[in-house]
Amino acid sequence: MFHKSVHAQIFQDYIHTVEFPSSPANLYDPIRYILSLSGKRIRPLLVSMGVELFDPSCVQASLPASAAIEYFHNFSLIHDDIMDKAPLRRGMETVHQKWNDSVAILSGDALLVKAYEELAKCPADKLGPLIRLFNRTALEVCEGQQYDMDFEQRDTVTQDEYINMIRLKTSVLLGCALQMGAIIGHADDTAQALLYEFGVNLGIAFQLQDDLLDVYGDPKTFGKQVGGDIIANKKTLLFIKLRALLQKADEAEFVHLLASDVEQEPKKVEKMKALYAKYDIQALAIDQKEKFTAIAYEKLRAIDVEESRKVALFALADALMIREQ
Amino acid sequence: MFHKSVHAQIFQDYIHTVEFPSSPANLYDPIRYILSLSGKRIRPLLVSMGVELFDPSCVQASLPASAAIEYFHNFSLIHDDIMDKAPLRRGMETVHQKWNDSVAILSGDALLVKAYEELAKCPADKLGPLIRLFNRTALEVCEGQQYDMDFEQRDTVTQDEYINMIRLKTSVLLGCALQMGAIIGHADDTAQALLYEFGVNLGIAFQLQDDLLDVYGDPKTFGKQVGGDIIANKKTLLFIKLRALLQKADEAEFVHLLASDVEQEPKKVEKMKALYAKYDIQALAIDQKEKFTAIAYEKLRAIDVEESRKVALFALADALMIREQ
């Protein structure tokens, strides 16, 4: 079994072999730039771990699939950052900020095509299933991003709608990465489906944990501004649960907090947290997170391979789900 | 041999079988909208004609490839219109105008994925070559668009740079459409390459003709505003040729015309045309157009199939190259 950092190195070595032309610079420089910001490379790791679960000898053959997933992820970051008007990504300027919107649109497009170029290098006998899975996932990620933008404009969003949105926007790509590994590792359909569901449910749990950390995380270790979702009135699971449970007596306070920015109401975060506490929202959200975590673990347990092979995936899931809280 | 309108009907029937989900509406409505504006559907026609040149029995099998090309073309229109801030397309509102930039970015992305979804439906034994050709072409189209935007910011552009830009931005997709047909029709590599070159050179000739019509076309039949390129100081072949030949004595007039809009210089178009006439620019541009047309015809002639099979492609080329002038 490879160690995570070994996987990371093998993948890094592989994508350094992929050449991007020097010209036109405004098309390919932004691609080199976003890929150099690197991030955690969790998705390529999932592809490799998916392969290893079934056939460790196929890891090398899966590297183009890893690259395809990583390129797709970075393409979606470039375009999402335009739509979200985000100035920073991984602590550095976003592509549209450093260049401009047109450059970001077009270099994102080119990176999506490069993802398919990598996909086409995958083992020929697996190409059909890999492309179909990748296409379905790619469309779902677009749908998730659209729902996320739609929800900003809407007054109410249900818990099911929210879970479905985060499933599409972030979780299916994790499931896809794992299943692509499984396909290349010659897993049967049942095992593929279980591993996919492991990834999707883990992804949802991870996103719910992120919502929790945004409110209850340690400012020293969280990375983002704690309370940021509350300040922005983001319709997270906590927000949705509170609104659903809110009693008449607290409605005025809730509406006041939503209508106020931190200039007008410097205690906006504390006061919203007080409402959360009154309705026990943190515990309810933790319940949901644990529900999806449990489903994920159950799916992984149900896969019919030697238990020793699953150790790395259980360890990864544990590591992801017990981040500093 | 099918008649053009028969091809168009078969293709139209096929893409009506491709379903787009109803939700999220802001993702899929813009796709339905741009596809309904339809246009001339020249690229699917080229795929069909490419197949028929070699094996008419494969036309049905090529319909997903036609759809992939047409979706790709419409994806690039949606994104190009954002970058060009174009309010109208085919006489109707552009997607970013009717919705907004974010919707146009994301629905364009989804349409590009849908193109690959169609591609994946092509005959399995041809999938590798089809995807590789499609990917290379898609990247080239992005490169062409980037060069086009870069050239707007540059002072000088050479003729070779300009021809290369229009080759990438518009012509390679025509070559790609024809070659995809050839691949599906079981053509050998030599025949594929000749048909591709026929398409690319015809595309360049067509674009040069468009530059000529923009200056010398009949306002009643041209469709766009005659003189539009001159008004916008667009660096077309005519502009580039004039600048290269311009003598000292005419430089002041040229610089004055470039620095003036039609408010300041109501005779901008006439005066620029007078300079074109002085240096015989129209004839020089026609020479170039005819050079590429001749190369295209030569490539088509060189393909080793029954001459009767080429009649439709020669007729199409003739029809494209003798538009109302």
Image (spheres, coloured by chain):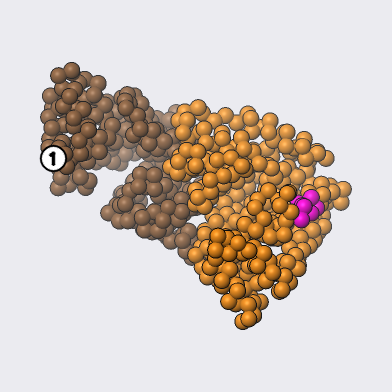
Chain colours: A brown, B orange
Identify residue type, mark 1: Pro
Q: Nearer the viewer, residue B236 or A4?
A: B236
Q: Please tell me whether residue A116 belongs to the stretch shown in magenta.
A: no
Task: Please say if A275 is above or below A68.
Answer: above
Can residue B172 be seen in the rendering of this structure?
Answer: no
Residue A37, percent from left and from top: 34, 56
The answer to whether A27 appears left or right of A246 in the picture is right
Q: Residue at x 52, y 52 (%)?
A: B84
Q: Place residue B140 in its image quadrant.
A: bottom right
Q: What is the quadrant of the N terminus of chain B in the image? A: top right
Residue furthest top as drawn:
A248
Residue furthest bottom as drawn:
B248
Q: Place residue A210 in its image quadrant.
A: top left
Query: Magenta residues, as a range?
Result: B318-325
Which residue position is annotated with label 1? Answer: A266
Helix or strand or loop: what does disc 1 sit on?
loop
Q: Place residue B16 in its image quadrant.
A: top right
Q: Specify the subunit that label 1 lies on.
A: A
Residue B244, percent from left and from top: 63, 75
Task: Please say if A131 is above or below B158.
Answer: above
Q: Residue at x 66, y 77 (%)?
A: B245
Residue B161, percent from left and from top: 60, 67
The answer to whether A67 appears left or right of A302 in the picture is right
Q: Please tell me whether residue B319 belongs to the stretch shown in magenta.
A: yes
